[in-house]
Image (cartoon, helix red, strand yellow):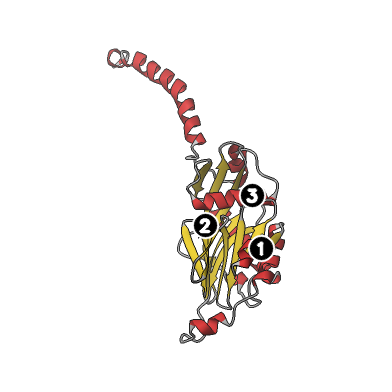
Amino acid sequence: MSKRAFPLLPLLSLAVVLTAAILPAFASRVQDRGLFGVTHTEPLREEAGAQPTAPPQRIDLVRRGRTQDDSGLIFVVQQPPEKEQQTALTDARAALQTLVDYGVLPADFPAASCEYQYNPVSRLLYRDRTTGESVSVYVMLLSCTGGSVELTMDVETGAVYALSSYRPPDDPDMDERTMEKMLLDSAAMAEGFAKQLGVSLTLDPVGAAYGYEDYLVEGASSRYFFHGTTYAIDIVLSDPPAFSLAADSMRSTSRFGDDAVSINHN
């Protein structure tokens, strides 16, 4: 037995040496690529680099990350552990209730009833390759009493950056004209949303001249578009729009992520 095992010792020793030399470097590369499952938000932030302290910079990072075509940004998706998922859900309910209190969501919005719909929350990291600044957000689809809501929320601050909510009308035969009469005041929505973000939002005078209401984020290159009725609310974080004047109508065009939205005013 000993004579058969002895020749293997040099090979095993060589394997140990190679493993000691190669594994740390390989592990470091894997960690740099964000492929290790980080289970807590604090280690994730330490790996990510400097955190931007001002809300406008955080908003710009999220807006750039949502387009997913910015070569100057590192984009990492992670699945939080179950305990963090529950904490994120509790924070999301609190954030939605804040939006109710600030008049962004209807007073009867059932924030406390919201649960994960289909899949649990995802945690996304956006990091600027040049400055090292980064921000982590939760992206979640929630099912609430009588409807659903999709939101993007800051992991660290709990601020909501974007939101889309829908509750079917009580009358299924209600037409669009009737719903348009229930439009919420975008200025009031902007005021409440700015308060929870901790920034100033002002109506863009250029867009307003074309009949298009979008709000500039002070200190940032991003802007917001607010549209809501009693049943559907969209708060869109977007790039600056490009405006053009057609011969027979005024038309404003805005790029929301990869989607182009045109509004015609005849």
Q: Secondary structure at mark 2?
A: loop
Q: Is residue 212 above or below residue 74?
A: below
- Foreground: disc 3 or disc 2: 3
**Picture residue at 46% right of the left edge, 85% below the top:** 172
Quarter placement of the N terminus? top left
> Gap between marks 3 and 1, in whole Å?
24 Å
Give residue 13's position: percent from left, percent from top.
40, 16
Q: Is residue 234 visible?
A: yes
Amino acid type at circle 2 is: Val
**Picture residue at 67% right of the left edge, 66% below the top:** 190
Number of the label disc, if any, that sits on residue 58: 3
Q: Is residue 144 found left or right of 56 in the rendered image?
A: left
> Gap between marks 2 and 1, in whole Å?
37 Å
Amino acid type at circle 1 is: Pro
Q: Which residue is mark 2?
A: 121
Q: Quadrant of residue 182?
A: bottom right
Give residue 15's position: percent from left, percent from top.
38, 20
Rate crowding at label 1 as few (under 14), some (14 to 19) or many (20 or more) other CA atoms within 10 Å. Answer: some
Q: Quadrant of residue 164?
A: bottom right
Q: Is residue 11 found left or right of 114 in the rendered image?
A: left
- Foreground: disc 3 or disc 1: 1
Q: Which residue is mark 1?
A: 205
Q: Secondary structure at mark 3?
A: helix
